[in-house]
Image: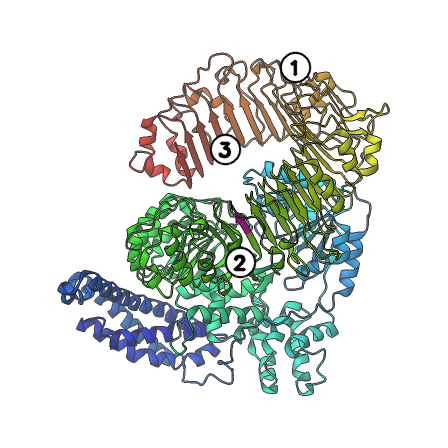
């Protein structure tokens, strides 16, 4: 703690104090007198801090004294900051209002406002008194002036990273676990668990990484995914990471069920390896919610779980024999330490250090993290006394409080005073949360990077400090992510420990009632965003008016940028205005549509993050934030204007406008803000002169940049003058809008990793993109005058050495494509994905082999393109063809001969195909790896095979998923043997679906709008598989009964919708003991009297639109597991529900979510819902007569959505309405 005071605040405070006094910022004699007293007293305290630093470890009284000093230093800094800000404001006012009022404006407010001066005087007197008390008490504590000792505080910061040492001592562990991973040991599931258990810092994660990246493992498993779980076991987030890791699309899947269905489809029939790292949760339901999709994988799939808790494995998985990771042997421990400390394998070259080094190794007790951290601590020290001092340090004698090892405390103790402060601040980062170097901007905003002794910028200093913490293992790189970092859990615990009472991180699983008094002490606070954050969590913040940091940290996977979090507006209206001393305010990813009014009054604010919110404008009051250094609005796609006085933000250094429309909204004078760095990735050319001058002077372009409207630039020379190579651009998207020509292609730069070209009436050939050595992604659109693509596209030597993705679209004049160079591997050696779209005249294709190509997408091209490319790319695993002209049965069967590696095949709008194969037996000889088959809009398709085998379909053993969509002439479908998922949609002529006679494995069945299909062909079929888990039936008019479904005891999800002929529902629903998700809607002939007892585990029910209105249904005996209920109006008989009391018999008290839809006569819900004390989400849609809401429930709701209501209700729920005091507690509110 003393080090934090010594390093961080007191030197800065003293410098600020000197500046205020020397520059005579205040003209009040009383204020000046008090400040002079501070200047005299502070050195007396600074002089004894070295002594206090040593004594606080064992003396509680000294520690308390230092805490009080730290609080007082914060208070002094706040006062000085306020005075300096006031002076800046007056200086700017003088500049803007002219000389006439300059004399009056020179006088600060604290001098002219008597009440303010009087109040400030009282505050200053109080600080002076406390300062004197601390001076008196230091004498009683025996604190004396003491030299800082031999610690090398001024050691140069290292800016280059040290290579991570090779992993030592885990060869045997790796070998044993590899055997478990690669073996097909007996298991009652198609996947098995490989647990690794050990204490923190033992190297569980490192060992898992070794296994994950092993070549044998890569070759053995078809899909791999790594998830860091930590103590917040979020099934949705975990599933999302796995889905995206195995190649899932970037969809906005917000429902866990939809996400897991999509994940199941990806895992279907694949042998996968999943690593769940750092698992803490012992809740059985957490695991059950997660594991569903894993059953779809192929036999031999494995899940590695790393955890500190052996008991967790027994409770969740009934696993009694996990792999227990032991400490390193003495020899291995010595090797790890020496490698990190001396860069050697032993002490032979440093015999004088052997005794002390082996003593340190012994105290680390075989723990890899401690050995590495202390080794790195000592790596620049070869002085024997330093090693001895470390070995003899008293910290080794302390108990291992909170699981923080003394070795790590020693590593921290050796940091410079500045680094200690920066590291302690990192306690605000949640465990396992990845972060980037934008952490430096937070350090800067807090004033931690202020250093008048150097000419280096704050950003430069921050970079050096960041690299030093990284090189000492306080930070770790995220694998395969150069720009992302993470802290080990023990390092996070260490940061929390040393930060003390000044920092608070509100984690999701934290105690809900944080004591009120604590908020008075805290100066920095972060909170992990839950999907819904309530006011009660922050109510105590009304007492926390000394906070400097209010940091919202979204709890999301790093690429889930679409996810939004909801915050009670009462926090923004009532709590935030109390926090006038904030330096850092982040509201990132919160669902807010305007900047809180109070922000403009936070005069000491340095960092404002509004990224990925729905704000439409920045208010003028933001321009009064004279200290603001960082403004982040990236992803605010509805933000279209900047305030008129934006240039008043003189201190602004970083302005992030990525993924916004603000480029052309910049004020003309912004180029005069010399320190300003603008991050943008969307640049629109409005006129030539403005664009060129902007880019020439814009030195801080970086990352991915899109420049649209380049056709308005007059010459290629102008573009070259921009000199992109001197900027930090690595991905470039250029849109000429029909103005691109051959001369302009000379603007290419060697550093680019991505290029997109749009438009170009005048371009007749492609530039030599093949010569860009770093290019990984290339997209070319709309160059209609290009007829031939050949050697000019490639250049000389190896062409496209790193290109992984190539997309060419809408080149309607293109006729010939040739890459023949005569040199094997000289063209596209790394190309993985190729897409050719809307190129109808491309006829001649002559390519070298494409050995790395895995994904091929062809759309609206001739059949010659398909046949040529498939010959050159025999390793394609995913083939998608759309609208290929000339693709007859005969041609297609020739293509099939080259599809031996294909796992996913999609055929759409190919109207000349009648049969995909002659017989399944023939198809099975070539489609040996086919796992998923989609056929869409093939209007002449009659059947999958021309000849149907009499003994059943049992040849295509790899096929797991079959989707048939809008094939109007499809008459029959014979299912291959191992099909697990079948979807048939809008196939008007299909009348027969044949299931295999033995070994059937169908788990998911979806029938939608197939008019000719007879129920006995499917549901009454004697070969119908008994293992069905999902049944979805939509718009099947011939379906009259679903009684047979009750024999499928494994059913988890059942949907019956828009089936007009069905009259009754099975009476023996209790037999469906696995059913959790049930939808029965818009079946106008179904009588409610058929309902009996409901499935015992039912959790989600959507029902309505049946024969009778819900008000006439009898009481229902719902199970206590039912928590989500959706009720629909629109019954066959006239709907008569006008009041919520008419629905109360359908509303069990267990509900957490209730949705009422299409009750056109519903007027009131003020009664009938009061008993729903667990309700968290209330949605009411299309009830145009509704006038009120259930007042008693509103404050406890997490979300309220009302669509299609009366104007009167809209007024009541507005910010001026009678419901607003109650609604303001609700995090998500949507009234429309």
> Which color mode does the image show?
rainbow
Relative horizontal placement of residue 1163, taking residue 23 as reference (left or right): right
User: In the image, which disc is placed on residue 1038?
Assistant: 1
Mark 3 surroundings: few (<14), some (14-19) or many (≥20) residues within 10 A: many
Quadrant, the N terminus? bottom left
Q: Would you say residue 580 is visible in this rendering?
A: no
Give x and y (percent) for residue 172: 78, 64
Name the residue: 66% across, 47% down. Answer: 833
Q: Would you say residue 49 is visible in this rendering?
A: yes
Q: Quadrant of residue 602?
A: bottom left
Q: Secondary structure at mark 1?
A: loop
- Residue range in magenta is 756-761
Name the residue: 48% across, 17% down. Answer: 1111
Q: Nearer the viewer, mark 3 or mark 2?
A: 2
User: In the image, which disc is placed on residue 1153?
Assistant: 3
- Residue on which the image places disc 2: 746
Give x and y (percent) for residue 386: 58, 84
């Amino acid at each position: 703690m003393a080090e934090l005071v010594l390093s961080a605040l007191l030197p800065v405070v003293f410098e600020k104090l000197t500046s205020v006094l020397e520059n005579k910022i205040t003209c009040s004699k009383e204020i000046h007198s008090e400040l002079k007293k501070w200047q005299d007293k502070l050195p007396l305290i600074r002089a004894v801090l070295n002594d206090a630093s040593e004594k606080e470890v064992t003396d509680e009284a000294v520690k308390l004294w230092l805490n009080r000093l730290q609080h007082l230093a914060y208070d002094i800094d706040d006062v000085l900051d306020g005075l300096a800000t006031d002076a800046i404001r007056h200086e700017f006012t003088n500049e803007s209002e002219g000389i006439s009022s300059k004399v009056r404006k020179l006088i600060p407010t604290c001098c002219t406002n008597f009440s303010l001066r009087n109040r400030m005087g009282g505050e200053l007197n109080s600080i002076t008194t406390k300062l004197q008390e601390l001076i008196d008490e230091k004498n009683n504590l025996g604190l004396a002036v003491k030299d800082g000792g031999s610690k090398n505080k001024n050691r140069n910061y290292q800016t280059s990273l040290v290579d991570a040492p090779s992993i030592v001592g885990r060869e045997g562990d790796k070998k044993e676990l590899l055997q478990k991973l690669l073996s097909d040991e007996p298991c009652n599931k198609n996947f098995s668990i490989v647990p690794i258990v050990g204490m923190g810092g033992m190297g569980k994660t490192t060992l898992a990484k070794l296994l994950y990246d092993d070549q044998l493992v890569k070759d053995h498993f078809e899909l791999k995914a790594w998830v860091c779980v930590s103590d917040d076991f979020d099934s949705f987030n975990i599933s999302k990471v796995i889905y995206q890791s195995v190649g899932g699309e970037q969809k906005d899947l917000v429902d866990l069920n939809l996400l897991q269905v999509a994940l199941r489809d990806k895992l279907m029939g694949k042998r996968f390896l999943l690593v769940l790292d750092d698992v803490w949760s012992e809740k059985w339901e957490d695991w059950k919610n997660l594991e569903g999709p894993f059953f779809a994988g192929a036999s031999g799939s494995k899940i590695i779980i790393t955890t500190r808790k052996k008991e967790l494995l027994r409770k969740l998985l009934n696993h009694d024999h996990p792999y227990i990771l032991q400490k390193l042997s003495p020899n291995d421990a010595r090797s790890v330490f020496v490698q990190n400390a001396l860069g050697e394998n032993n002490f032979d070259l440093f015999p004088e250090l052997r005794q002390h080094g082996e003593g340190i190794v012994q105290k680390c007790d075989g723990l890899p993290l401690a050995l590495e951290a202390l080794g790195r601590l000592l790596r620049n020290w070869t002085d024997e006394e330093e090693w001895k001092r470390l070995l003899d340090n008293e910290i080794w004698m302390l108990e291992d409080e909170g699981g923080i090892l003394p070795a790590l405390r020693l590593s921290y103790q050796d940091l410079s005073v500045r680094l200690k402060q920066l590291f302690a601040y990192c306690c605000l980062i949640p465990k396992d949360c990845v972060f980037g170097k934008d952490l430096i901007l937070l350090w800067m905003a807090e004033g931690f990077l202020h250093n008048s002794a150097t000419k280096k910028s704050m950003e430069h200093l921050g970079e050096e400090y960041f690299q030093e913490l990284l090189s000492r293992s306080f930070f770790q790189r995220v694998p395969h992510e150069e720009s992302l970092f993470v802290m080990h859990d023990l390092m996070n615990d260490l940061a929390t420990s040393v930060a003390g009472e000044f920092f608070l991180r509100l984690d999701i699983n934290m105690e809900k009632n944080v004591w009120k008094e604590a908020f008075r002490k805290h100066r920095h606070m972060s909170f992990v965003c839950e999907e819904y954050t309530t006011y009660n969590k922050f109510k105590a913040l009304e007492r926390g008016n000394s906070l400097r940091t209010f940091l919202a940290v979204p709890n999301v996977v790093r690429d889930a940028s679409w996810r939004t979090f909801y915050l009670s507006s009462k926090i923004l209206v009532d709590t935030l205005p109390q926090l006038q001393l904030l330096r850092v305010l982040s509201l990132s990813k919160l669902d807010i549509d305007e900047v809180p009014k109070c922000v403009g009054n936070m005069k000491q604010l340095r960092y404002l993050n509004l990224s990925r919110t729905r704000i439409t404008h920045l208010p003028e009051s933001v321009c009064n934030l004279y200290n603001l250094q960082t403004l982040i609005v990236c992803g605010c796609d509805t933000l279209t204007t900047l305030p008129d006085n934006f240039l008043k933000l003189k201190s602004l250094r970083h302005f992030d406008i990525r993924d916004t429309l603000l480029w052309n909204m910049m004020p003309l004078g912004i180029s005069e803000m010399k320190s300003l760095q603008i991050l943008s990735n969307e640049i629109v050319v409005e006129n030539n002169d403005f664009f060129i001058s902007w880019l020439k002077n814009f030195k801080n372009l970086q990352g991915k940049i899109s420049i649209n409207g380049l056709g308005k630039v007059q010459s290629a020379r102008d573009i070259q003058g921009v000199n992109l190579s001197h900027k930090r651009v690595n991905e470039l998207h250029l849109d000429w809008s029909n103005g691109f020509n051959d001369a302009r292609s000379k603007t290419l730069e060697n550093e680019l990793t991505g290029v997109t070209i749009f438009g170009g009436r005048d371009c007749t050939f492609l530039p030599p993109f093949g010569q860009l050595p770093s290019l990984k992604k290339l997209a070319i659109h709309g160059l209609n005058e290009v007829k031939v693509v050949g050697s000019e596209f490639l250049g000389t030597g190896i062409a496209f050495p790193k290109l992984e993705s190539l997309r060419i679209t809408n080149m309607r004049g293109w006729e010939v494509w040739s890459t023949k160079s005569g040199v094997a591997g000289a063209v596209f050696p790394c190309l993985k994905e190729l897409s050719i779209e809307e190129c109808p005249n491309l006829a001649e294709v002559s390519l070298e082999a494409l050995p790395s190509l895995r994904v091929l997408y062809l759309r609206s091209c001739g059949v010659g393109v398909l046949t040529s490319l498939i010959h050159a790319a025999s390793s394609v695993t995913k083939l998608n063809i759309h609208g290929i002209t000339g693709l007859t049965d005969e041609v297609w069967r020739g293509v099939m001969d080259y599809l031996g590696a294909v796992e996913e095949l999609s055929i759409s709008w190919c109207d000349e195909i009648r049969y995909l194969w002659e017989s399944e037996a023939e198809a099975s000889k070539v489609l040996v790896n086919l796992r998923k088959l989609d056929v869409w809009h093939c209007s002449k398709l009659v059947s999958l095979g021309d000849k149907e085998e009499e003994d059943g379909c049992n040849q295509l053993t790899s096929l797991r998923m079959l989707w048939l969509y809008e094939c109007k002439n499809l008459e029959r479908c014979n299912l291959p043997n191992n099909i697990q998922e079948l979807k048939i949609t809008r196939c008007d002529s299909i009348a027969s679906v044949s299931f295999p006679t033995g070994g059937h494995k169908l788990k998911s069945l979806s029938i939608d709008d197939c008019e000719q299909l007879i129920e006995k062909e499917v549901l009454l079929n004697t070969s119908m598989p008994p293992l069905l888990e999902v049944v979805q039936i939509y718009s099947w008019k011939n379906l009259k009964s679903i009684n047979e479904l009750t024999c499928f005891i494994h059913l988890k999800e059942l949907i019956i919708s828009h089936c007009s002929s069905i009259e009754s529902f099975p009476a023996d629903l209790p037999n469906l003991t696995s059913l959790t998700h049930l939808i029965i809607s818009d079946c106008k002939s179904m009588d409610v009297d058929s309902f009996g007892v409901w499935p015992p585990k039912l959790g989600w029910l959507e029902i309505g639109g049946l024969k009778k209105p819900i008000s006439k249904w009898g009481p229902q005996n719902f199970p206590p597991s039912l928590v989500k209920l959706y009720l629909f109006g629109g019954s066959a008989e006239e709907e008569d529900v006008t009041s919520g009391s008419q629905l109360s018999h359908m509303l069990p008290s267990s509900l957490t979510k209730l949705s009422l839809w299409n009750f056109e006569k519903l007027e009131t819900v003020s009664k009938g819902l009061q008993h729903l004390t667990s309700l968290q989400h209330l949605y009411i849609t299309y009830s145009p007569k509704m006038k009120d809401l259930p007042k008693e429930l509103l404050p406890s709701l997490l979300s309220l959505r009302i669509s299609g209501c009366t104007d009167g209700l809209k007024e009541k729920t507005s910010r001026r309405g009678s419901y607003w005091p109650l609604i303001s507690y609700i995090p998500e509110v949507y009234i429309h």
